[in-house]
Amino acid sequence: MNDRLGTAVELIVFAVFIAAVFIVVMTSLTFLSDQCSRGTPVLPALFPCFQER
Amino acid sequence: MEMAAWETFIRSSALHAFVRTYEPWLWPLCETLHYLGLSILLGTVGLFDLRVLGLAKGIPIESIHRLIPWGIGGYLVNILTGIIFFVGHPDQYFYNNAFRLKALFMVVAGLNVLAFYGTSAFRELKTLGPDADPPLRAKVIAGTSLSMWVAVLICGRLLTFYRPPFFH
């Protein structure tokens, strides 16, 4: 019983971890897009705004 | 704006012509291999990271470490198929912030590998018994590795949604 509970907790922690990484990635990409829309790009050398080639 | 010189060069290469000619079967084949490569990479390196972080303590770390060559194999498959994707449609990747973020995470993952094997972190782990708790430094490196590879996976999946407006 304790083993099953332990595995369940580990799986929940892992799912929260994946969700956290996903949120960080999505927030970063959304932030970059928003800054481009406002005409104030962040770190344009690494992440330029691609409106045209 | 004109097409950049590097893009013109890639588009005039034999590999670009080959990829575009056989794209209907080559692209799905490479996507499948890319998916398998990442699965093997995360299934071995990710498993090793989880063990260092404290999961499945009964398994000796050195035993799981024997799987790492499989992870390196998966990584090499992904580098090769990734090159084919990039050469086939360079604009889709170069002018894409999801790709740039993915590359950044891969660089951090690479530096993390250097921090693991280039310092005493790995040697310390090798001497540990099956139920021993790894030192904090090894856990930080394992946590960074797992985070970076999961982030690389997510960015790869998001590439399609951040294509440049001029891509067709």
Image: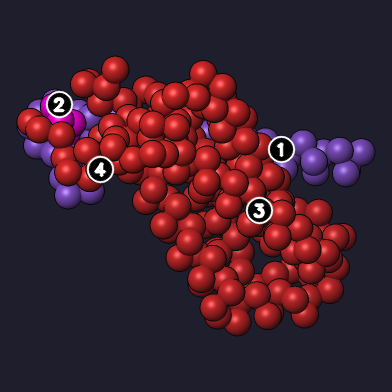
Foreground residue, B134 or B27? B27
Q: Inspect this view and state whether residue B57 appears.
A: yes
Q: How many marks?
A: 4
Q: Which residue is mark 3?
A: B73
Give the CA separation, mark 4 to mark 2: 22 Å
Q: Nearer the viewer, mark 1 or mark 3?
A: 3
Q: In the rendered structure, which amino acid carries the disc numbered 4?
A: Phe
The answer to whether one can see residue A13 in this image is no
Q: How far is the residue under mark 1 from the one under mark 3?
A: 27 Å
Most extreme residue toward the front is B14
- In the image, A52: left or right of B76? left
Q: Are marks 2 and 1 in contact (CB under 8 Å)?
A: no
Read off the residue under disc 2.
A51
For chain B, what colour was chosen? Answer: red
Residue B145 percent coordinates (x, y): 55, 56
Q: Read off the residue under disc 1.
A: A11
Task: Establish if B57 lies above or below B154.
Answer: below
What whole-number distance in Å separates the C-alpha atoms at marks 2 and 1?
A: 42 Å
